[in-house]
Amino acid sequence: MNRVQTQHESKSIRRILQSMAIAAILPPMALLQTTGLNAQITSRPGVIKGQVLVVDSSGSSYVPATTVVLNGPENLTAESDPNGAFSFPSVAPGTYVIQATAPGLEGEMSVSVDAGQVADVALKMEVAATTSSVTVSADAPTVDIATDDQTVKQKTIDDAPNADQKFESLLPLVPGVLRGPDGRINLKGTRNTQSGALVNSANVTDPALGGPAISLPIDVVSSVHVVSDPFDPQYGRFTGALSTVETKTGDYQKRHFSIQNVVPRWRDRAGTIAGLGAATPRLTYTGPLVRDRVALTQSFEYRFIRTPVNSLPALERDTKLEGFNSYTQADIIATSRQTATISLAIYPQKLNYMGLSTFTPQPSTTDFKQRGYQVYAQHRYMSGAESALISQFSFKTYDVDINAQSDDPFRLLIDTTEGGFFNRKNRRTTRYESVESYQFAPRKYLGSHQFKAGWDYAHSDLQGIEKSLPVEIAGSAGNAIERITFTPSPWFDIDQNETAFYVSDQWTITPRLSFNTGLRFDHDTVTDSAHIAPRGAVQLSLTGDGKTLLKAGAGIFYDRVPLLLPAFEQFPNRTVTIFEANGATSSSIPYQNKIVGSIENPRSTAWNVEIERQVTSQLAVRAAYDNRNTARDFVVSPSSGIDSGIVGLSNSGSASYREFQVAGRYQLSRVTLNGSYVRSRSYGDLNDPLLFFGNYPQAVIQPNQKGRSPFDAPNRELFWADVKGPWKLTVAPVYDIHTGFPYSVENEYREYVGPRSSKRYPRFSSADLQITRPFTVHAGDRDLKLRAGGSVFNVFNHDNPRDVQNDLNSTKFGSFYNDAWREFRGKLVFEF
């Protein structure tokens, strides 16, 4: 697609969205004005009834004796009868999430019920996703409520304040998950390129860098789960934690539309409107294509967002993101024993002024452009009530172009940066992945065994080119003290084949004691090596009532190799020239990129132990300890002789993470309170290769050192709640307070002075709040449902700087900048 066509389509999309906004806003506004906000809001109860679909052991299409839980304006529980039927005869009007569980099966869907109306639903159940926890048998004592703060569920996605309106932004609600100083999400003390990322069990990482690389409209997400130590051997190719996203199942019975964010946000600069600040309209549809057989979900999202760096001049402080996300999903019930899901995600976007900061103005930043899509298909065959064959295929593309604002000479000054950014990139990546897994029916031998086996094959390909222009470093007097020049780079082409096999056994010895053991075998063609990773976990009920659980696990994990690293020797080589005060050359050393030794897969060894206690029917608490040690981590470091040097890439790095956590949940009929305290330490080698060869590379490479990770926060307290207040208000406050992130001190040559990570930002403290209320406006024979409210971010306007002057030669050394000011956002959701 050429540039003119792209610009034309972008303008067309904007015109369409503007028309949608006017069409969606004016009728409700006019109606509210003519009725004087006196539209009848009725409180008559409604009815939700239906049947639980799929199969029992005799091949029936319905599942009897299934626990059905209703969450929403009311929280209720029912059980399906012998025909799979269930009923909630008197519920408050509103939108609910229905969940059903049975041995080996689970199901979830959303349903809306009007006042005095009956909502008839068909709840489809699927094979339950395997988690790292060990599940006791059905006749074991059970816990009434759980401290499941590792999962962000649908209600939290709807109610919690979310500035970005992206599912990733809610992950910091999980204890031990932080948004680092670079804006990326770090799971349990690891870089985002070391963690795993799945959407509907499909790998969604970027093969080139290893980090998450997909954008989904948040309206299609039903839950986001963080697995700190995924000891199930089906999970692999990472050394950190794992995030898994599940999308909503389409509605097989009725059609539903929702429209959100149709009102744009203007850019306010000192009380003056200076153009558009953001426009993020979303449109989502779900409904049957073939009733009770095929359901379609379609969601579109346009994103235009300006994000300010508050320490820069008023009209020169914004990054500008423009993107379009489309997600299409078909859910299919082929027979009583076979179901399938097919989806297509498309996520092009462009980010102008990437790297903008207090010390890097707009002319010295880059423009980041991505194009990509993912095709996904999963088929599930229920061979029995508790056995199933799951077949899965996915194909993903992810292309990246990074270009500077100009070719002007790039100069690093003490307090700012001049010229156009020095680096340009073009990358094309693809990945095919095929997964087969079979869950066997339970076998009886010294208890109950449930075996699972699987196979996973993935092929990834990377093609690209890098170009780097000269970099000049200026000293305190403004004169050039160092110059870095680069050689041309050839077009590189790297591919990789990865194969994995695994087996696991969930062994329930008694209703109070269970083990989960497994073995994973990995092989990839980049390292040409094979690895065996044993894993195991145990769960023990310490008391006869099942309200005190002891859980523990241990395992070995092998990471993937980002495809940029095998291409390391093809990146531009550099020559570093040092100048005297009079401009004469002091030294000039050429450096060659070299892989030291062979490329190996990083390895981590992890173990954890935790205890959970159901103190009362409303209060559950947990104490846990996590320990992870990573070896053979990738690092890059320069070394030189008199006339030449190398920039060496090796597996000589190591890292460690320790976490002690105390968490609790207090739940009443209208209030849920969550609180946690985490004491942690993330430590290791700091010269991550992707800092210097990733999307936004640093120009100067200093020798590697060990220290606290850039996202290390030793003490963190997190509190959040979901409150059903008076007048149908939903109130969701979040309070996050943690130790400031570490930073290093440099001199004018960008050399580190003293130990790295020896200084810290001020303590971070932010209170966010969202309040919403549902409305039903009657317009003739039709009802317009909407949910309106607003959010406040950083309620108390606490000073949370994101930039620091760390150059000893600056007169402003130690000063902090770019505070995240208090922000207000509105929320308006239309449902049909």
Image (spheres, rainbow, N blue to C red):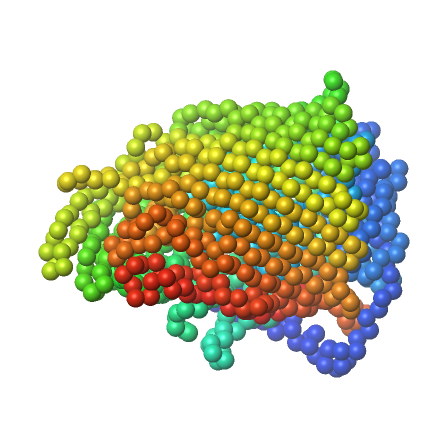
Which percent across, then down, holds residue 62? Answer: 82, 38
Depth order, front residue of 806/191: 806
Q: Is residue 300 left or right of residue 85?
A: left
Which percent across, then down, holds residue 199? Answer: 58, 44
Residue at point 60%, 49% (across, down): 677
Quadrant location of residue 360?
A: bottom left
Depth order, front residue of 816/280: 816
Which percent across, then down, holds residue 347? Answer: 51, 53
Q: Is residue 254 visible?
A: no
User: Relative to 139, is 817 above or below?
Assistant: below
Depth order, front residue of 83/484: 484
Depth order, front residue of 183/128: 183
Q: Is residue 456 left or right of residue 637?
A: right
Residue at point 42%, 74% (across, down): 314
Query: Where's the N terminus, which quadrant?
Result: bottom left
User: Relative to 578, is 822 above or below?
Assistant: below
Residue at point 29%, 63% (across, down): 810
Quadrant location of residue 474?
A: bottom left
Residue projecting furthest to the top: 445
Quadrant location of residue 95?
A: bottom right
Which percent across, then down, holds residue 758? Answer: 39, 50
Q: Is residue 71 left or right of residue 771?
A: right
Query: Where's the C terminus, which quadrant?
Result: bottom right
Q: Is residue 550 visible?
A: yes
